[in-house]
């Protein structure tokens, strides 16, 4: 079979790339080694985690939130099997949706492990052992990422789990030790904390959410502590030993010092993800790699002719929407158009309670770059809608260039932050200023009014504080 484009990997990078390429008239095949389409994101990442985050938030609301609104219910009972069914049904609806979109766009899914035999040639080893060779003008590597492992710590996906196992635990562990205070550790830690686990987080750095705005991270940590989280910051895991009922985890101060042993019923290793390119044959065809990532130029091209790469397998934030936008861009470039991704305006969301949503630079980054900036802040405790919904935790922080007022960053800690961040994203795409944001009429009463007020606060003219 001969194609214009073969995409290896059907995650958000790969499947979106395939659809856009098909829209542009290309004959496309997608090679996928899992049984279903959609990659990490749809099968064992974004989608199942959000299904459990939503369901567990409802459980928590029923237990502790509704009474204050005058809605009296008895203590809620956890039906974990039903909650997991909701998660599985959500995953199925999404992966089947991708299969439908492939049919609609006449894209050939090819199930099996793909290997680039040579530029223009992809070998697919099927589950039945048979190998098929496909010919193509262009190849896009969209093979994504895999769980990063702690040396010497065996993940059995039952007691010591990665994010994949943490999405399918048979019961809430009485005590869950989470290694890593990044997005995935805090999201999945939140799920199990709401369902009854005592959650203890061990983090190597002396802060949570590395890379995000420090002020947001500090306030978020206090809110998580109010929810029962306990943190051992500045500590590393020295060993994890299985016991008959769980695990003993020995931690040491990162800077050196006395070790402590913690007992837990479950351990979630959430120290990050690493690019996944095993078995692709990249060494044989001489594709340049750096720190496990496929090296690409500004047009997603590797050093091998006709071989491109996108998503978690290449540099940049490991986010589904970044992979999707790169998929669109490379499809358009291959069709002779000017595909492009603006890496300055990629939002990032932590889907906890409250949510954290950010776009652009942090204060720390601006300081390090020597860029003069002005800050506008507004707390949700002064927002009418937030009070009406009892979601007053958190604040909005707007960072604008001191000389031009151009928006440089927006940081939101609060209920619904993940939806609200996009007005800042759109504004940044258009090179807008804090003044532009401040002069846009925002519907009243909405949480989003806090963004307008924070933008007004940049010029010290917030009204409601
Ligand atoms: C628990 C969890 C929650 C997350 N939540 C979010 C979130 O809320 N928002 C967000 O933006 N991101 C989230 N992410 C990250 C997100 O899942 C990734 O950034 C995204 O999936 C990357 O997309 P991708 O297309 O590059 O790769 P992937 O989604 O990893 O897809 C790669 C695909 O390639 C296939 N593949 C690999 N090698 C081969 C081969 N040789 N032959 C055939 N197929 C192959 C794999 O089986 C896989 O299906 C989350 C991740 C996890 C683990």
Image: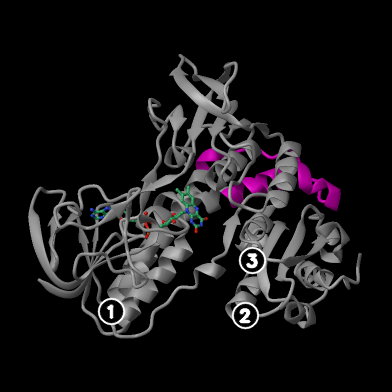
Answer with mark 1 or mark 3, whichever residue precedes in sequence. 1
- Which residue is nearer to you in this view: 115 or 288? 288
Secondary structure category for the residue under label 1: helix
Q: Main secondary structure of the magenta part?
A: helix
Q: Nearer the viewer, mark 2 or mark 1?
A: 2
Location of residue 149 (image quadrant): top left
| Residue 33 falls within the magenta-colored stretch | no
Q: Nearer the viewer, mark 3 or mark 2?
A: 2
Q: Quadrant of ligand 1?
A: bottom left
Q: Are marks 1 and 3 in contact (CB under 8 Å)?
A: no
Residue on which disc 1 sits = 334
Secondary structure category for the residue under label 2: loop
Secondary structure category for the residue under label 3: helix
At a point 38% along the width and 83% down the height, the residue shown is 338
Residue on which disc 3 sits = 419
Answer with mark 3 or mark 2, whichever residue precedes in sequence. 3
- Which residue is nearer to you in this view: 13 or 171? 13
Q: Are marks 2 and 1 in contact (CB under 8 Å)?
A: no
Where are the magenta residues, as a range?
Answer: 53-82
At a point 42% along the width and 77% down the height, the residue shown is 340
Residue on which disc 2 sits = 431
Quadrant that contains the C terminus = bottom right
* Residues packed near mark 2 inside 10 Å, few (<14), some (14 to 19) or many (20 plus): few
Q: Point out residue 347 in the picture as x, y percentages from the top left corner.
A: 57, 64
435 with respect to 144 (left or right)? right
């Amino acid at each position: 079979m001969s194609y214009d484009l073969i995409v290896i990997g059907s995650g958000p990078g790969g499947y979106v790339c395939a659809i856009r390429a098909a829209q542009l008239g290309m004959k496309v095949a997608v090679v996928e080694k899992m049984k279903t389409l959609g990659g990490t994101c749809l099968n064992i990442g974004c989608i199942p985690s959000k299904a459990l985050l939503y369901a567990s938030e409802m459980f928590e609301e029923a237990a502790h939130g509704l009474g204050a609104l005058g809605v009296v219910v008895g203590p809620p009972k956890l039906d974990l099997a039903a909650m997991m069914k909701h998660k599985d049904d959500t995953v199925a609806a999404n992966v089947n949706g991708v299969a439908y979109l492939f049919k609609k766009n006449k894209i050939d899914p090819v199930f099996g492990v793909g290997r680039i035999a040579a530029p223009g040639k992809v070998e697919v080893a099927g589950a039945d052992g048979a190998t098929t060779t496909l010919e193509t003008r262009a190849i896009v590597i969209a093979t994504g990422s895999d769980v990063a492992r702690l040396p010497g710590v065996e993940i059995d996906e039952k007691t010591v789990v990665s994010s994949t196992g943490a999405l399918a635990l048979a019961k809430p562990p009485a005590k869950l030790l989470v290694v890593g205070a990044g997005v995935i550790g805090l999201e999945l830690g939140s799920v199990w904390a709401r369902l009854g686990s005592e959650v203890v987080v061990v983090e190597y750095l002396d802060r949570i959410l590395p890379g995000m705005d420090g002020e947001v991270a500090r306030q978020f940590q206090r809110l998580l502590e109010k929810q029962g989280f306990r943190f051992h910051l500045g500590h590393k895991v020295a060993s994890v030993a299985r016991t008959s009922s769980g695990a003993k985890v020995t931690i040491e101060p990162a800077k050196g010092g006395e070790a402590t042993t913690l007992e837990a019923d479950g351990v979630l290793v959430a120290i990050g993800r690493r690019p996944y390119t095993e078995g692709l044959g990249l060494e044989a065809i001489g594709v340049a790699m750096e720190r496990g990532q496929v090296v690409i130029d500004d047009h997603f091209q590797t050093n091998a002719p006709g071989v491109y790469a996108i998503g978690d397998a290449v540099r940049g934030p490991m986010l589904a929407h970044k992979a999707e936008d790169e998929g669109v861009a490379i499809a358009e470039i291959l069709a002779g158009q000017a595909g492009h991704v603006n890496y300055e305006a990629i939002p990032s969301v932590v889907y906890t309670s409250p949510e954290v949503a950010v776009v652009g630079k942090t204060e720390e980054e601006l300081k390090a770059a020597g860029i003069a900036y002005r800050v506008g802040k507004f707390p949700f405790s002064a927002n009418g809608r937030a009070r009406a919904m009892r979601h007053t935790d958190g604040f909005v922080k707007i960072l604008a260039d001191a000389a031009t007022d151009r928006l440089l960053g927006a940081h939101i800690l609060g209920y619904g932050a993940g939806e609200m961040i996009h007005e800042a994203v759109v504004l940044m795409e258009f090179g807008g200023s804090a003044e532009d944001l401040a002069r846009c009429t925002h519907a009243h009463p909405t949480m989003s009014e806090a963004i307008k007020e924070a933008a007004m606060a940049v010029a010290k003219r917030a009204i409601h504080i």
